[in-house]
Image (cartoon, rainbow, N blue to C red):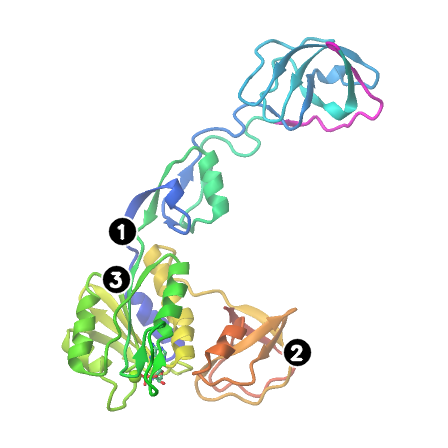
Amino acid sequence: MITVAEALDHLLSLVAPLPTEQVGLAEAAGRCMVAPAKALRDQPPFAASAMDGYAVRAEDAKPGQTLTVIGEAAAGHAFDGTVETGQAARIFTGAPLPQGATRVVIQEDVTCQGDQISIGEALEDNPFVRPLGADFKSGQEVSAPRVLRATDIALLAAMNISELTVTRKPQVALMSTGDELVMPGDTPAPDQIIVSNTYGLKAMLQGMGADARILPIARDNRASLEACFGLAQGADLVVTIGGASVGDHDLVGAVAASLGMERRFYKVAMRPGKPLMAGRMGDAAMVGLPGNPVSAMVCGHVFLAPMIRAMLGLGKTLPPRHDARLAHDLDSSGPRDHYMRAEVKNGEITPEPRQDSALLSVLANANALMIRPAGDGPRKAGDVMQYLPL
Ligand code: AMP
Ligand code: MG
């Protein structure tokens, strides 16, 4: 049995960054941009008014000053005259500051009569001008690699970048195995249960930027498993769920091997998730997850997520661990790393009282996986523990 760290090393060696493709900006959210993007212009491209008011020369911005309004500048409609001493131009937010003007007096600080304005006593100091290039300068970079968030997309749009180079989405095929399983929405026989793992994993992996498809359920026989592996063709990563223990009905390893899977490892010193297997199968990486619903989801977080990140070109890094103080004492832990379902609240971590790996309701209530290393001794309330956020 290998350690979690060794298993991660093996898993990351099974994958490599995928090729890139071009996408339009409107389709780029959640994609991994691989080449830095460079601003194609300054923003703002001119000194712009930050408010509605009057553009004036700074020396004219004095309480009691009377000025003549000589024109108007609105967003998209520059005023091409020059503001001289004693003059002002009506100006609106986003309009270019006219020649000669160096600041804006907001309309609240002014009284007007015909084409004359006079500046009130409570004049604000703020010049209300956004200098040219205040947001970004032409050539300024958005660094890569990065998974594009909505805020990145807005910035790239302002930079006038309409196409981006991103990593192709990792194609993941998810296969549940078991005679007892039916799909959500179907009518189960009394001895059947509903598939949950493939659905949970699809949601998890899609949220990370992969394309995950759910294969038909493979039954616990060779022919059905072979047929389902056939349907996984074209995937970068094939994930099976269940059928990986040593029971009479656990055929996944044997069938995968007969289809050419070169196994790297089987079994990891981890709770939950011990019967994990992985290897290469043709052009794809293959990971066999345990069937217990919580095990499968925990293994998705711990093992599949770093593989997806590596395929996206985000590097072979492990998810950062966070720290929290233990809410109460704990007995010593067992001989395997234990990823305990837990709740973090106000910097304190409380493991859920029930840790059975079949309890999805417990997992859904948790917001963290608290990590207890193999052989961890008794712990006291207040001890700092590491966890992975869920
Ligand atoms: P196995 O590893 O096939 O022995 O499965 C272990 C346990 O997980 C059994 O109780 C299965 O019924 C259950 N199980 C296996 N696959 C799934 C699945 N895709 N969704 C929900 N439960 C599953
Ligand atoms: Mg099974």
Question: Which residue in the structure is indicated by mark 2?
Answer: 382
Residue at point 40%, 35% (across, down)? 161
Within 10 Å of the Cα at label 3, are there few (<14), some (14-19), or many (20+) other Cα atoms?
many
Disc marking residue 19: 1
Total residue callouts:
3
Question: Residue 94 occupies which quadrant of the picture?
Answer: top right
**Is there CB contact under 8 Å for labels 2 and 3?**
no
Which amino acid type corresponds to the residue marked 1 in the rendered image? Pro
Which amino acid type corresponds to the residue marked 2 in the rendered image? Gly
What element does badge 2 sit on?
loop
Inter-mark Cα distance, 2 to 1: 47 Å
Within 10 Å of the Cα at label 1, are there few (<14), some (14-19), or many (20+) other Cα atoms?
few
289 in magenta: no
Does label 2 or label 3 sit earlier along the sequence?
Answer: 3
What span is colored magenta in the figure? 114-130
Does label 2 or label 1 sit earlier along the sequence?
Answer: 1
Disc marking residue 236: 3
Residue at point 36%, 81% (across, down)? 193
Q: In the drawing, does residue 312 fall left or right of residue 149?
A: left
What element does badge 1 sit on?
loop
**Quadrant location, the N terminus:** bottom left
What element does badge 3 sit on?
loop
Residue at point 77%, 28% (across, down)? 124
